[in-house]
């Protein structure tokens, strides 16, 4: 049953029509840490697929679903989170930045929140790797939200999703990083 549900979930992700509204996904920096809010994970799995990006996913049961979906969409998956296996997962991401495609992705507020509260992991990774941080924002007009801690955004099948890339930045702290994410959201909402 689990395999069937995973296959259906991956099929649903493939139906999403991604439209880039800010930044060029084909002109990503050679090295960067791509950051997003946990609620945007489903859309970003689809949007950044087949690029060989190294991603950090929690070791939880829910994380297992996301890890398998990411593998199917061409990501290099490393397991760990702030609560379990943090240092090993972050070291694996750092090695991936050096030996992989040069891009790593992670949810700023995952795996348990609080929602939209930036944690320092991305700053640590970017500093260690000497790479900028690239913020991402997702907008999905035809969607609903789950009742989970992150209020995960679930677009309807075959709907259009808009993905915005911020400018590469080197924030000094988590507050500056959260402000950059809020600015990206504000610029995106001003486009409506």
Image (cartoon, grey):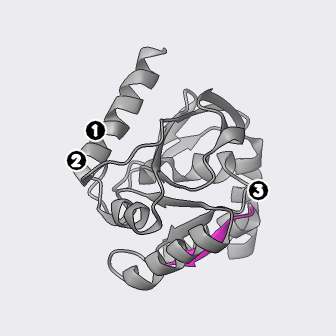
Quarter of the image where one finds residue 55: bottom right
- What stretch of residues is rendered in magenta? 74-80
Percent position (x, y) of residue 126? 42, 61
Front-lying residue, 15 or 81? 81
Is 128 or 46 nearer to us in this picture? 128
As measured in the structure, the alpha-carbon distance from the residue carrying label 3 to the one carrying label 2 is 31 Å
Instruction: Check the picture and name the quadrant holding the N terminus.
Output: bottom right
Cα distance in 3D space between marks 1 and 2: 6 Å
Q: Residue at x 50, y 47 (%)?
A: 40
* Disc number placed over residue 175 in the picture, else none: 2
- Residue 145 falls in which quadrant of the image? top left
Q: Are marks 1 and 2 in contact (CB under 8 Å)?
A: yes
Residue 74 in the image: state x and y as whole percent. Answer: 74, 63
Q: Identify the residue shown where x is 73% and y is 74%.
A: 3
Relative to 162, residue 172 above or below: below
Question: Is the residue under label 3 in contact with that under label 1 (CB below 8 Å)?
Answer: no
Q: Is residue 86 left or right of residue 141?
A: left
For the residue pair 71 and 34, the one nearer the viewer reads as: 34
Q: What's the distance in space between the residues labelled 1 and 3, CA to CA? A: 30 Å
User: Which residue is located at x 72 percent, y 40 percent?
Assistant: 26
Mark 3 or mark 1, which is nearer the start of the sequence? 3
Q: Residues within 10 Å of mark 3 (few under 14, many from 20)?
A: some
Q: Secondary structure at mark 2?
A: helix
Looking at marks 3 and 2 on the same chain, the residue that comes earlier in the sequence is marked by 3
Q: Secondary structure at mark 1?
A: helix
Q: Is residue 59 visible?
A: no
Could you tell me residue 70's position as x and y percent? Answer: 66, 64
On screen, residue 57 versus residue 46, left or right, reads left
Residue 50 circle label: 3
Q: Which label is found at residue 179?
A: 1
């Amino acid at each position: 049953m689990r395999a069937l549900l995973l296959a259906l979930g991956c099929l649903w992700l493939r139906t999403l029509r991604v439209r880039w509204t800010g930044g060029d996904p084909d002109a990503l920096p050679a090295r960067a840490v791509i950051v997003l809010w946990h609620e945007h994970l489903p859309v970003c799995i689809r949007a950044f697929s087949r690029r060989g990006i190294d991603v950090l996913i929690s070791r939880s049961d829910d994380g297992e679903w996301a890890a398998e979906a990411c593998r199917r969409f061409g990501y290099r998956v490393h397991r760990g989170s702030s609560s379990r296996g943090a240092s090993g997962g972050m070291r694996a991401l750092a090695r991936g930045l050096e030996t992989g495609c040069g891009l790593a992705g992670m949810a700023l507020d995952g795996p348990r929140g609080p929602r939209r509260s930036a944690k320092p992991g991305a700053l640590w990774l970017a500093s260690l790797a000497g790479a900028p941080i690239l913020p991402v924002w997702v907008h999905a007009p035809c969607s609903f939200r789950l009742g989970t801690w992150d209020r995960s955004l679930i677009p309807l099948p075959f709907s259009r999703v808009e993905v915005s890339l911020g400018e590469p930045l080197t924030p000094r702290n988590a507050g500056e990083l959260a402000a950059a994410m809020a600015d990206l959201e504000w610029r995106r909402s001003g486009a409506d």
